[in-house]
Every structure is written in C-alpha cells, then in structure tokens.
Amino acid sequence: MIRVTGLYRDMSDSEFDFNYYVNTHMPLVKKRLADFGMGDFEVERGIEAADGEAAPYICIVHIEFPTIEDFKRGFEKHGEELSADVPNCHDLGAPP
C-alpha cells in the first residue's frame, strides 16, 4: 500500500471551503478512483499554533492506493476532471 499526500498551503488571502472539499470533492475523487484501488482517505484541517502563528497548510489530504501504478493510472484517466473541480472548493490551485 502507498499513501499519497496533498498539501494545500495556507495563504491568508485565499478561501477554502472545507464543507465542499470533504462532502463533494473527495466523494467525487473516491467515486472516480475506486476502480483503481483507492482505499481510505483522510482530510486534516490546519489550525493555528498555540502562539497564534498560522498553520503552514490549510488542508492536508491523504489517499491510499495498493500501488503507485494504480494511483498513476487513476489520475491519468480522471485527473483532468478532478482538477477541474478544484476551483469549486478553493482558489489555491492543486497541491504539488
């Protein structure tokens, strides 16, 4: 098993809709990539530190696949559609 991690950097002037990301975008990802072995996923929200410093990442997502090849095949087939949905949940661009 492999775990793919996407990091969305926190930028103070950007918007991030966690409700859309968790309840619409990620179920779409799961639906499209299930045939390629996508397993569980986790979405983490960055929160500020105890000293008030902003979190470096506003969102971190982890997605599990059996192999890197499965992940690549899934994103080769559905990556364009999934990337096109990204602006619906935030204006940060796709994670690196």
Image: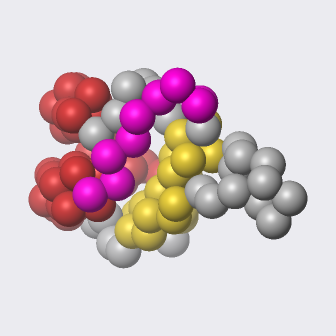
Identify the residue at the far front of this view. 52
Q: Quadrant of residue 83?
A: top left
Instruction: Say left or right for 35 vs 64.
Output: left
14 within the magenta span: yes
Q: Residue at position x 23%, y 51% from top?
A: 20
Above or below: residue 21 compared with residue 41: above
Residue 45, horizontal then vertical, whole percent: 52, 60
Q: Residue at x 29, y 33 (%)?
A: 86
| Prevailing SS of the magenta stretch | loop
Over which residues does the magenta segment extend?
11-19
Question: Above or below — where is 44 with respect to 72?
Answer: below
Q: Residue at x 35, y 34 (%)?
A: 90
- The stretch drawn in magenta includes residue 77: no
Could you tell me residue 46's position as x and y percent? 60, 57
Of residue 58 and residue 25, the one placed in the foreground of this image is 58
Along the line of sight, the residue nearer the viewer: 19 or 73: 19
Classify residue 82 by image quadrant: top left
From where the camera sits, is residue 33 visible? no
Q: Position of residue 39 (x, y in %)?
A: 33, 72
Q: Is residue 25 visible?
A: yes
